[in-house]
Image (tube, helix red, strand yellow):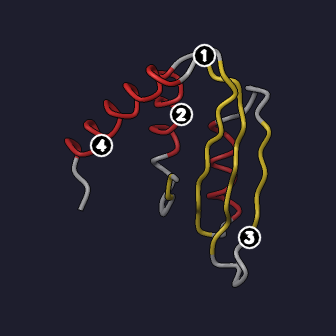
Amino acid sequence: MSTKNDSQAFYAKLKTQLEETTQFPTLYMYKFIVPSSESKIQQVHKVFDNMGAVIDTKQSSKGTYTSVTITVNMESADAIIAKYKEVSVVEGIISL
């Protein structure tokens, strides 16, 4: 079971890794798996609206889940993490 402290530690570690390995601005690739519901997929799309993001979707073989890959130019580690937090409210989403 995930707790608030677990997610804070995860994001702190991610921020450190991004700042140590990435030169900003950078083209960043997000990968998510969401239940195959048009409304859930649209929720993910809305988070990246008006950012010039390239969004690809692919449905699983049984059609239960949809993989969403988003490539977008990001200005900082904080901006990347902010988007992860925004999409985390989508019910059933898995961030890869």
Q: Earlier in the sequence, mark 1 or mark 3?
A: 3
69 or 48, nearer to the observer: 69
- The residue at which mark 4 appears reads as 7
Q: Decide which of tag 3 and tag 4 comes sooner along the chain.
A: 4
Pointer 2 residue: 83
Disc 1 to disc 4, C-alpha distance: 22 Å
Question: Regarding mark 3 in the picture, which secondary structure is present there?
Answer: strand
Q: Residues within 10 Å of mark 4 (few under 14, many from 20)?
A: few
Q: Position of residue 93 (x, y in %)?
A: 51, 58
Up the image or down, 92 lies above or below 45; here it is below
Q: Which residue is mark 3?
A: 59
Which residue is pictured at 41% across the width and 29% down the height?
Answer: 17
Residue wearing tag 1? 75
Dot 1: what SS? loop
Q: Earlier in the sequence, mark 3 or mark 2?
A: 3
Quadrant (top left, top right, bottom left, bottom right) of the N terminus:
bottom left
Q: Quadrant of residue 27?
A: top right
